[in-house]
């Protein structure tokens, strides 16, 4: 089963490491608010979305509006930290445990001052037979890799 879910109007917030004080770890208030809002909006917009119990694959797409920070800089976020914060927020909503996520991919589609915020997530329940066996993976020699890398350098549109 593969389902896409789209949430508009919530600006993605990247995951950040917790700060420590008084011997405790504290998550950013902005991150906590974002994760709560994303989970709540997902439940509201998709009340019948199943909370997948098995192994799954996730695909994320992010559209993020840049806003001035307290120092006056625009903070561009990377795909990995946007993915991590969304993945944590959706645990218990679209999948029961993020330890069951065995494949994740993320795209930052657009990130600027004019972007309308949006998050799209695809949840695909996997069957164990979908997972490639180690013996089915083809290995290449370093010389073959160099040839492959050179081909991509010459034709970057073929990479995607």
Image: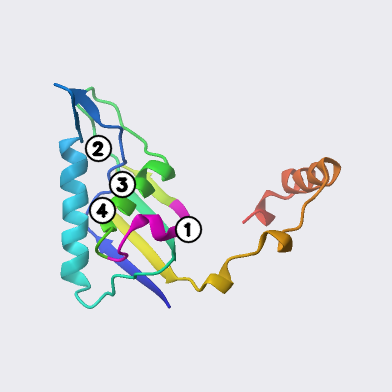
Q: What distance separates the C-alpha of mark 1 from that of mark 3?
A: 17 Å
Residue under numbered circle 3: 85
Mark 4 element type: helix
Of tags 4 and 2, which is closer to the observer?
Answer: 4
Q: Earlier in the sequence, mark 1 or mark 2?
A: 2
Residue under numbered circle 1: 102
Residue 14: x and y, percent? 31, 41
Residue under numbered circle 4: 89
Q: Which of marks 4 and 2 is nearer the N terminus?
A: 2
Label 3 crowding class (10 Å Cα cut-off): few <14, some 14-19, many 20+? Answer: many
What residue is rendered at 22% in x and 73% in y? 46
Q: Which mark is residue 67?
A: 2
Q: In this view, does 144 lie above or below 134?
A: above
Q: Answer whether residue 143 is magenta in the image.
A: no
Could you tell whether 2 is left or right of 131 in the image? left
Outermost residue to the right: 143
| Along the line of sight, the residue nearer the viewer: 14 or 129 | 129
> Dots 3 and 4: beta carbons under 8 Å?
yes
**Which residues lie in the magenta part?**
94-107
What residue is rendered at 33% in x and 53% in y? 87
Q: Is residue 69 above or below residue 139?
A: above
Of tags 4 and 1, which is closer to the observer?
Answer: 1
Residue 59 location, quadrant: bottom left
Could you tell whether 149 is left or right of 82 in the image? right
Residue 31: x and y, percent? 22, 41
Label 2 crowding class (10 Å Cα cut-off): few <14, some 14-19, many 20+? Answer: some
Residue 4: x and y, percent? 37, 70
Instruction: Name the quadrant of the C terminus.
Output: bottom right
What residue is rendered at 63% in x and 64% in y? 132
Q: What distance separates the C-alpha of mark 4 from that of mark 1?
A: 17 Å
């Amino acid at each position: 089963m593969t389902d896409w879910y789209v949430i508009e109007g919530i600006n993605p917030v990247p995951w950040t490491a917790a700060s420590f004080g008084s011997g405790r770890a504290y998550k950013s208030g902005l991150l906590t608010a974002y994760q709560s809002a994303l989970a709540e909006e997902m439940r509201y917009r998709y009340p019948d979305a199943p909370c997948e119990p098995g192994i799954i694959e996730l695909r994320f797409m992010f559209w993020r509006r840049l806003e001035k920070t307290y120092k006056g800089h625009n903070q561009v976020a990377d795909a990995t930290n946007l993915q991590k914060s969304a993945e944590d927020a959706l645990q218990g909503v679209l999948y029961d445990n993020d330890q069951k996520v065995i494949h994740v991919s993320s795209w930052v589609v657009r990130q600027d001052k004019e972007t309308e915020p949006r998050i799209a997530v695809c949840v695909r329940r996997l069957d164990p037979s979908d997972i490639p066996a180690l013996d089915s993976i083809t290995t290449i020699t370093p010389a073959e890799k160099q040839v492959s890398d050179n081909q991509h350098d010459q034709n970057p549109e073929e990479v995607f």
